Amino acid sequence: MKKYILLLAIITMFSCKGVLNQEPIGSRTDADYWQTEADMLDALSGTYSLWATRELGMHDLFFDNQCDDHYRAGDHAEDEDIETFNTVFSNYKIDVTFVFKYEIISRANAIIINGPKVKKLGTISDESYNTIMGEAYFQRAYAYYRLYVIHGQVPIIKEENVIAGNYKVAKCESPEVLNAFILTDLQKAADLLPMHNVASRVSKGAAWAVMTSLYMHAAKDYANAENLNKAITTGQQVIDNYPLAANYLSLFRAGNETLPENLFLMMNDMEWINQELMSKHRGPRPWGMYGFQEPLTDLVNEFEPGDIRKHVTLVSDGDSVRQGSLGWFVHTPDLSNTGHDYRKYMDWRESDGMYNHGLNIPFVRAGDTYLLVAEAKIRLHGPGAGDAEINKIRARTGLSPVSGADIKALIHETRCELAGENFRWQNLLRWDKAGIINLEEFIIRPEKLYPADIGRSIWKRPKNYYQPLPQQEIDNSDGVLVQNPLWGN
């Protein structure tokens, strides 16, 4: 595979408002770098900033096109390939999302390797050192987590590979091996990170939350006691220490980096961001967005009457939206193919009515973990075992508490709580692997596809549980890297 490594001589780190607020480091070499706490913070800033690029802040979301919530409204051929399970190995979004995750891994590896040098010099406190190292382990783990859920098996580039200059590495033996490696990194992160970090930087809760998700992905049998109990243990740590926000809308608006529920965010800024991120890619083009994904009526109908999440998440024909000082605008049939759009990330500045593409986007939040714990309990102990966690989620929805909730009720609650947040496809895959649902019933639906795409969708398990690896990386590996199982070469 390609050689991805942090080149301090040429890379200028972003200054993310609210993340690290570091000045760009300019031109530096390894000979004069890794001297101070500021050097480590600059390098860490580089890991956070890549999540807010077009490649990861927008393109990495298109894999959720395969789920039953979205109508693919864009005209990009690579999106059509992904949605219909016909991904070609040269698919642009397969390639760039893969590369950018390895750049994060490279930058995190640089911190993990060189951080001890700074500590030895005595130019950083133990507290700051542990926090930064914990964040580096988390960033590496989260990049691998996204590679895991999309590709299953990828090369694992460790510190020893970087030190030896060995980047032509075969992919790991199985998705289970990658899952275990990520869990090891997350445990290191959880051991080093504080319980509560400064706003916009991850703490123990982010590591525990992703660990919980990984255990649930590993629980392929319905009542897999080992992994489901582990998910409950790590998830309970989140529940005990990170309360839910009282106001659902506040999770997606300015200032959301201060909410304990938001455990890891893509930090945006109106001053420097590239303006092509998740906050803008869903919504009508006449309103200043790109219209790449539109909610299907089936998702709209999933919400119970009186559920405040519906109004926060969706806007439908006849609904009005205030666009700052420009006033109120009615959603009309000409704005979307389905009659609906995602409202969750729509925001306009009051001062001039300009679309606010500077929202911070939650990647990991405690609400998801509460529901994963509820699911694990239901799968282990039966209906009603997850009521406590589900009702904590429902307490802010305007709905009555549930009693005796079964797995079907859990799936309903998860769909409504996380709609439009890039979780649905991965949850459907988990549930299909565990025999909870038949995924074909959710995705092979004429109303979901362009008329020309009807009949093109070819879903095959287990092949389509994962996407193929980029052909460019296979070519660059000189035969070391091979394509994912069942995709061929």
Image: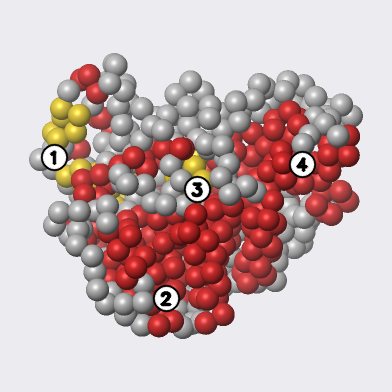
Mark 4 vs mark 3: which is more N-terminal? 4
Mark 2 vs mark 1: which is more N-terminal? 1
Q: Residues within 10 Å of mark 1 (few under 14, many from 20)?
A: some
Quick check: 216 left or right of 164? Answer: left
Residue located beneath label 4 in the image:
126
**Residue lying farthest to the top in this orientation:** 352
Q: Secondary structure at mark 2?
A: helix
- Residue 427 location, x and y as percent? 42, 65
The residue drawn where x is 32% and y is 58% is 393
Amino acid type at mark 3: Leu
The label on residue 377 is 2
Where is residue 148, by image quadrant? bottom right
- Residue 88 location, x and y as percent? 52, 57
User: Marks 4/1: CA distance?
Assistant: 53 Å
Amino acid type at mark 4: Asp
Q: Residues within 10 Å of mark 4 (few under 14, many from 20)?
A: few
Amino acid type at mark 2: Lys
Residue located beneath label 1 in the image:
319
Mark 4 vs mark 1: which is more N-terminal? 4
Closest to the observer: 143 or 17? 17
Q: Quadrant of the C terminus?
A: bottom right
Closest to the observer: 4 or 245? 245
User: Marks 3/2: CA distance?
Assistant: 23 Å
User: Marks 1/3: CA distance?
Assistant: 32 Å
The residue drawn where x is 53% and y is 61% is 237
Residue located beneath label 3 in the image:
263
